[in-house]
Image: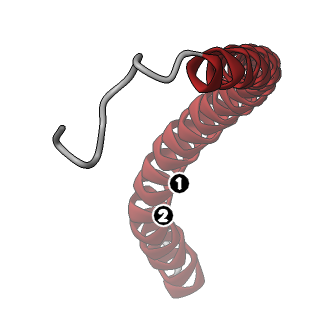
Amino acid sequence: MFSPAEALLFAALVATTACLVPMYLRLKRLDRYHAQYRDMVDWSATALVGASNAVQAFAQDGRMVLEDLSREIESAKAALDELKAERLRLTSAAQPAAAQEPGAGPSLTGA
């Protein structure tokens, strides 16, 4: 009732099943690795978007600071020019007054 051909087919079925079980376990593990990899790629993409936004904000803030600094430098240069002009005006006004008063001012001769 149990022929050698059936025994051979049964042995082939058992061997195939024995090979499929480890392959199935490997596929399950590969599926877990794939899910972890997908999660890491999604996390990396989110992190890159955040980094890109931070770089853009930093560039925009830097540009604003540079513009403000440039305005302040121009304002300081204008104030310095005004101070130089006022000093020149005051020194030029003081020189003719010192020339008119011979007794005023320090003497180089010590007398």
9 displayed left or right of 2: right
Colour setting: secondary structure
Where residue 29 sits: x, y (%)? 43, 49
Check residue 82 in the rendering and tell me which mark sits there, or answer none: none
Q: Residue at x 53, y 68 (%)?
A: 13
In which quadrant of the rendered view does residue 81 lie?
top right
Where residue 54 sits: x, y (%)? 66, 24
In which quadrant of the rendered view does residue 101 lie?
top right
Check residue 27 in the rendering and tell me which mark sits there, or answer none: 1
Q: Is residue 60 above or below residue 3?
A: above
Residue furthest left in the image: 110
Which residue is disc 2 drawn over? 23
Where residue 40 sits: x, y (%)? 54, 38
> Is residue 57 or residue 107 the one in the foreground?
107
99 displayed left or right of 59: left
Q: Residue at x 79, y 26 (%)?
A: 70
> Is residue 69 or residue 7 the one in the foreground?
69
Disc 1 on helix, strand or loop? helix
> Is residue 110 or residue 42 the one in the foreground?
110
Q: Count residues near mark 1 (Cα–Cα under 10 Å), then give few for <14, some for 14-19, many for 20+.
A: few
Q: Count residues near mark 2 (Cα–Cα under 10 Å), then give few for <14, some for 14-19, many for 20+.
A: few
Q: Residue at x 58, y 47 (%)?
A: 34
Where residue 45 sits: x, y (%)? 69, 35
Q: Is residue 59 above or below residue 38?
A: above
In which quadrant of the rendered view does residue 82 lie?
top right
Q: Is residue 27 above or below residue 53?
A: below
> Is residue 66 or residue 98 the one in the foreground?
98
Disc 2 on helix, strand or loop? helix
**Is the C-beta separation of discs 1 and 2 under 8 Å?**
yes
Q: Amino acid at mark 2?
A: Met
